[in-house]
Amino acid sequence: MHHTATILAVTASPDGNYIATGGADKRLIIWSAADLKPLRVFTQHRDAVTGLAFRKGTNQLYSSSKDRTIKTWSLDELGYMETLFGHQDEVVDVAALAMERCVSVGARDRTARLWKVVEESQLVFRGGGGGGNTEKRKPEENSLTNGDLKSISYAEGSIDRVAMIDEETFVTGSDNGGISLWSMHKKKPVFTVAVAHGLDPPLKPEEASAEAVPDLKVPGEPQPRWITALATVPYSDLILSGSWDGWVRVWRISENKKRIEGVGVFGNVPVVEQNIHEEVRMNGVGSIHSEDVEQGPVSGVINDIEVFERGDRGKDGLCVVVATGKEHRLGRWKIVKGKNGAVVFEVPRKAALDPIPNGVKQLNGEISEMQSKK
């Protein structure tokens, strides 16, 4: 009645009665939140369960899997409902809000799909762009880049994360560092933030070569940090993203829902030089180079972000829980110095409602850590 391999996804039901976990053992397990006793084990998925999302205000659950399907479940009856087919690669994330629909992303099939469960239909949104400017787009309108990266474009190989803003708008995160804004009325991204978490420094010659005296010419180019976590405050304009640069970055959607604008980061921003600090503040995010800005307050790879309101309708502010690890949740693609655990940011309502000068602010809140020593 328990998992026999790595747990890849966990979520709690809106009423607080159930916890659902999915793992690399192909199992979806429903637990009682009161005593953490397993209530039911589902084995209908034929590969690892990678994502879980409850329909808001209900006990209807969506699960995504590497078997290329999304399955729906009713926890009121602790039973299976139906399977949604369409993705051409493993489904790595799923999101849902109040309506009976969900959005999923299919990794290297480079599509996001909005599933209308009642109508038994789906809308397909195709990515695969460069995550930056294209010939048909005006850079000042349809893309946003950090600092001197405006002329650089990185091909999108995989869409890995998704989060819904409202019933018709959602955002995705990709392995080229891009965060894309989508509307169900348009098949291509409305707007894309390119290289949202900056670039990894290039490999050192001794790291890239097995020679005793390696060539001093550094091979290749710096690569963008993937978007490894994405979350929103539902029915608002706030977006949170994570990677392995140590920062939870905060973005907001413009009033016309056609742009994503940088707001700031959680925690203090230590910068080497004042002129660099000004450039960082103008961008609303940390610097793009690791030599300019120290590692952020979150150590390791940010594998997931969860946001919930504190108090009655958020009167006490927001609580942001960040899940961290030494490596990416789906594979040892990147090993980062850090801990397996969680970091909790508490944002007072006053800070969330303060006016933002020049569209940029730094969100400071109390931080607590819950980390294991693995």
Image: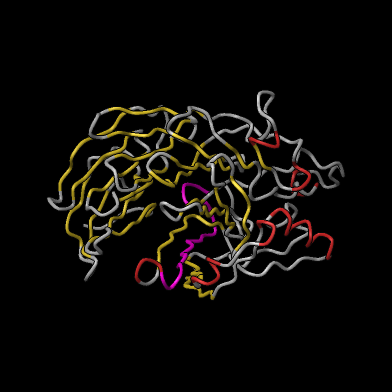
The one nearer the camera, 250 or 53, is 250
> What is the total number of numbered labels drawn onto the structure image?
0
Indicate how the structure is coloured in the image. Answer: secondary structure
83 in relation to 261, above or below: above
Horizontal side of 283 relative to 123 (left or right) equals right
The one nearer the camera, 281 or 105, is 281
Image spot of residue 174 (x, y percent):
55, 40
Horizontal side of 230 relative to 311 (left or right) equals right
356 in relation to 334, above or below: below
Magenta span covers which residues? 315-332
Name of the residue lying farthest toward the left: 77
Question: Which quarter of the image is occupied by the N terminus?
Answer: bottom left
Asked whether residue 152 is drawn in magenta, I would say no
- Residue drawn 36% across and 33% down? 68
The image quadrant of residue 121 is top left
Asked whether residue 323 is drawn in magenta, I would say yes
The image quadrant of residue 26 is top left
| Residue 373 visible somewhere in the drawing | no
The one nearer the camera, 330 or 252, is 252
Image spot of residue 160 (x, y percent):
49, 41
Image spot of residue 224 (x, y percent):
66, 44
Name of the residue lying farthest toward the top: 136
| Residue 10 visible somewhere in the drawing | yes
Horizontal side of 342 relative to 208 (left or right) equals left
Image spot of residue 255 (x, y percent):
54, 46
